Image (cartoon, grey):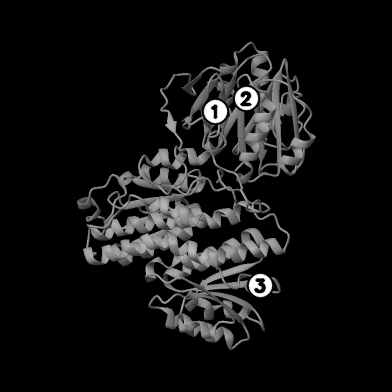
Amino acid sequence: MCGIFGYIGKKSASDLLVKGLLRLEYRGYDSSGIVVKNGQLQSYKDTGKISEMASALPRLKGSMGIAHTRWATHGGVTKENAHPHVSNDGKVAIVHNGILQNSNLLRKRLTKIGVELNSETDSEIFCHFIAMELDQGKEPLEALQSVLSMVRGTWGLCVLFEDYDYVLCARNGSPLIIGRGKEEMFVSSDPHAIREHTDQLVALEDGQIAKVSARDFQVMQTDGQEVESMLLHLEEEWSESEIGDYPHFMLKEIHEQSESLQHCISGRLRHAEGTSVLGGLQIQPQNLAQLPHVRLIGCGTALHAAQIGQILIEQWARVPAVSHVASEFNANDPVINPNALHLAISQSGETADTLSAVKEIQRKGADVYGIVNVVGSSIARQCGKGVYIHSGPEQSVASTKAFTNMVGALTLFSLQLGRSRHLSKTKGKMIGREMRKLPDKIRTYLENPGPINAAVELILKAKSVLFLGRGISSPVASEGALKLMEIAYIPCLAYPAGEMKHGPIALIEENSPIVVIAPDDGVQERTLNAIHECKARGAKIILIHEEGDPISEVGDICIPVPSTIPMLTPLLTVLPTQLIAYHAALELGNDVDRPRNLAKSVTVE
């Protein structure tokens, strides 16, 4: 959840470090800092926005340094707890992502031998123990190996030394990427921050250490055995992060959904056969035909995409499917069928809970396929096969276009799976035709989004908001509620429409706003019953429906979207919920792109 950036070369390190941190800002942070080597280690850190830290930053000369954005886990949001942490003799500086499980024990050990601790963090112990190992005559690599043998937990760690012209990096459960430039090297927790400098990347694996100098790097296991690393190529689109004419990244990314969905489906539909081909899955049709069931795993927005995927798979392929909350998956000790198909869904490909579930499934003998956005991410590498959703970099913490592309990729998979089983070519071709129309329909809707401001005005007067949907619209309701909570901080509940009378109806008061997702999808009549029950108790209905549908007569505020076939409606009905959340947050004066307490990549369990 925190961010790391490092530079070794000939240029001014401080300028590049700050720029790297700004590119990592979307991961979430509450403090930041940098340390640069220029004869000695010079550091500066503070709480608040990175831009504020940068504006107060003294001139730190030097061409080697490391930097960090912190999202608090151990210790409050204070300047002392911000990274980097520097040993008391000034010879070792570290930045660390992750959580150390035995930090209390190690902190007590340091205090007992007279080491003064300067923060409440678990991370600080690294610099002091490494400095102590150096004092005993060990080389930096040997010192780091010794300290790593003491700690328990997760780390993405970078260590800078006053007396040595290289950086040591170590990974265990928290991502680190090395970028090779021309007589310069970069280190980051996220490839997006490196891509503007180089497209040649190496991702460290768990249990690896890297020694990085300006001209080269060496990767080895923790025991020092050198390993060969594979260079990854990151597409040019990942260097693009300019906001352009938009006031916020979230609004920009909402409007990019037409183009990003086009990228997701481009080249993957096969009209003549009425199917799709996802080559990264590496599964033959005859093997797809034999699947006993499909499991989909995700967190947050990815979970809602998984829930839509579950319905699509069962509708088109007639294969049992179930979606799981990744953070609960291992705790429930699931029974794993090695013959089943497992899909791990994550925008960043670094979601710790999802990655943990992937490893557990593999440990029990089954394959897992990743559905991710980031090339070379941990889940992509751990799975070894899967689907890239091709939504490009997403800077806003609240996910929009990645949700659309996750659903798009799962729709393609469901079509491919369906055609390997019972779905007819005629129906497959019809689905493909409708999918091709979706990018234009998204663009058309966003050009004229309807009475979003009226919906926002009603919502802002309420204590809470209820979102309802039935069938494939129920996960859309959950995603809409999540967006409004994430950035507007308004309490929300999302329920299947039929469940409303089993509890949430007690919350309805006069003028209570209820957002209802009600496309003409075959279950609309039953959704209509829930609407009447809400209106009878004084609720105001914000109705998201398809253009020309007579159901608009029951809405107090009606937001029409273009029509499509029922199973594709989530790709259109989600759009108004994104805009409602955005404009509500804007009216409340919130930081739309950087909501409080949230991080883009949740890399700790």
Q: Are marks 2 and 1 in contact (CB under 8 Å)?
A: yes
**Quadrant of the rendered image containing residue 292:** bottom left
**Quadrant of the rendered image containing residue 154:** top right
Q: Residue at x 65, y 35 (%)?
A: 19
Looking at the rendered structure, the kind of residue marked 1 is Ala
Residue that extends furthest to the bottom in the rendered view of this protein: 536
Q: Earlier in the sequence, mark 1 or mark 3?
A: 1
Q: Residue at x 46, y 36 (%)?
A: 234
Residue that numbered label 2 is attached to: 159
Looking at the rendered structure, the kind of residue marked 2 is Val
Residue that numbered label 1 is attached to: 170
Q: Secondary structure at mark 1?
A: strand
Q: Which mark is residue 459?
A: 3
Q: Is residue 358 above or below residue 21?
A: below
Q: Is residue 127 above or below residue 138?
A: below
Q: Secondary structure at mark 2?
A: strand
How far apart are labels 2 and 1 at the CA level?
9 Å
Residue 428 placement, left or right of 384: left
Q: Earlier in the sequence, mark 2 or mark 1?
A: 2
Looking at the rendered structure, the kind of residue marked 3 is Ile
How far apart are labels 2 and 3 at the CA level?
49 Å
Q: Residue at x 26, y 47 (%)?
A: 283
